[in-house]
Amino acid sequence: MNVLVIGGNGLFGRKTVLKLLQDTDISRVVSMDVIPPKEWIMSRYLEYGEKFKYARGDVSELEDILNIIRIWEIDKIVNWAFLLPGDIEGNPRLSVKVNELGMCNAFEAARLTGISRVIYASSWGVYGPQDENGDRDVTEDDHLHPGSAYALTKQLSEILAAQYAELYGINFTALRPTIAYGHGARTPPMIKNYSDLVSFPAVGMFFSIDQDGTSKTSLFTPDDIGTFTRLLLHVDASPHPAYNVGGPPTSMRQVAEVVRKYIPDAKIEFGNIPPPENRGKFGIPWRASSERARQDFGFSLLTLEEAVKIHINDARSEAGLELIK
């Protein structure tokens, strides 16, 4: 099995590539991106020799995807190429080129080359605010209420996937992840804050935020995405077209407690700004159900302790520091 990971050097992509390289049933993993892998993650890829390939390519250019598929005889596609809120507001046209035209290009490339298995990124944002669903875990069967340009592109991606599936027999699986945190995350602010909360103390830096750190949201890590993607690639089709990926509501203070278990002298400071009282009326939900993924594939997310330890060591690896045990 030869797998193409589009957006392979992003937050999701690099850990997906690593998880797939560890799979003995996969012969080659090709990472396509406009930028090459960072040194700290590339050093891990090199352990797998010729099994890993990096190919420069732009998801908004159909020919780039087609050329890579043909050169490396790709069997299955994973598309993690997207721009997040925080990036797209300043460049609406680029967001459409990457998030929508790029997604359609990935689907069209599969059609033109006879690839029948595609896994791609939707978003937790398609559900709309928590208040749309009440005070409970949101499931894949709930109605979609996208309230941002980003969420709308993700809903449109799911509609396109359904059309391609019906017309051309391609088997798609969409992942609807909640809030990611992992080393190197930059946008939007919530993702950056949760990520810096671990990455900064890991290398001896001070982390502070004006908020009081009590607001909770569903979290997941890039390692979770990589693990689930690996499971999905081993089936010709998934029982359902979309799956949530997210854990129980977790606050920044809870993450900080775990960081201090590994780094007792971690310098972390919270302010006194509480969560907004009307938080449930805007944004995205903070309660997620990943039960469908567990039932269909036996998938479970990392514990907070496991995830934070991996995150700390990723940051220390890039800084050239000794890893924690």
Image (cartoon, helix red, strand yellow):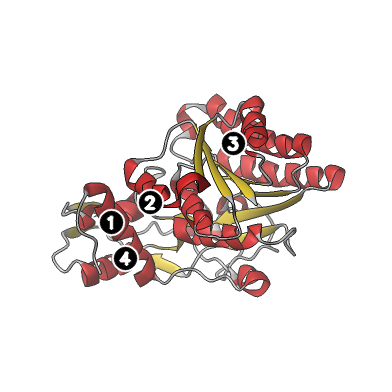
Q: Sequence order check: which comes first, mark 2 or mark 1?
A: 2
Query: Mark 1 = which residue?
Result: 197
Q: Sequence order check: which comes first, mark 3 or mark 4?
A: 3
> Image quarter for residue 134?
bottom right
Image location (x, y in percent) of residue 224: 49, 61
Q: Sequence order check: which comes first, mark 2 or mark 4?
A: 2
Q: Residue at x 75, y 65 (%)?
A: 239
Residue type at the position of mark 1: Leu
Q: Nearer the viewer, mark 4 or mark 1?
A: 4
Q: Sequence order check: which comes first, mark 2 or mark 3?
A: 2
Task: Tell me, for residue 44, which label it has, or none.
Answer: 2
Q: CA distance from mark 3 to mark 4?
A: 32 Å
User: For the residue carrying disc 1, how many other residues have a C-alpha within 10 Å: few (<14), some (14-19), or many (20+)?
Assistant: many
Q: Sequence order check: which comes first, mark 4 or mark 1?
A: 1
Is 65 in front, or is 21? 21
Residue type at the position of mark 2: Arg
User: For the residue carrying disc 4, how many other residues have a C-alpha within 10 Å: few (<14), some (14-19), or many (20+)?
Assistant: some
Query: Mark 3 = which residue?
Result: 99
Q: Residue furthest left?
A: 265
Can residue 31 be seen here? Answer: yes
Q: Secondary structure at mark 2?
A: helix
Q: CA distance from mark 4 to mark 1?
A: 13 Å
Q: Residue at x 63, y 42 (%)?
A: 152
Q: CA distance from mark 2 to mark 1?
A: 24 Å
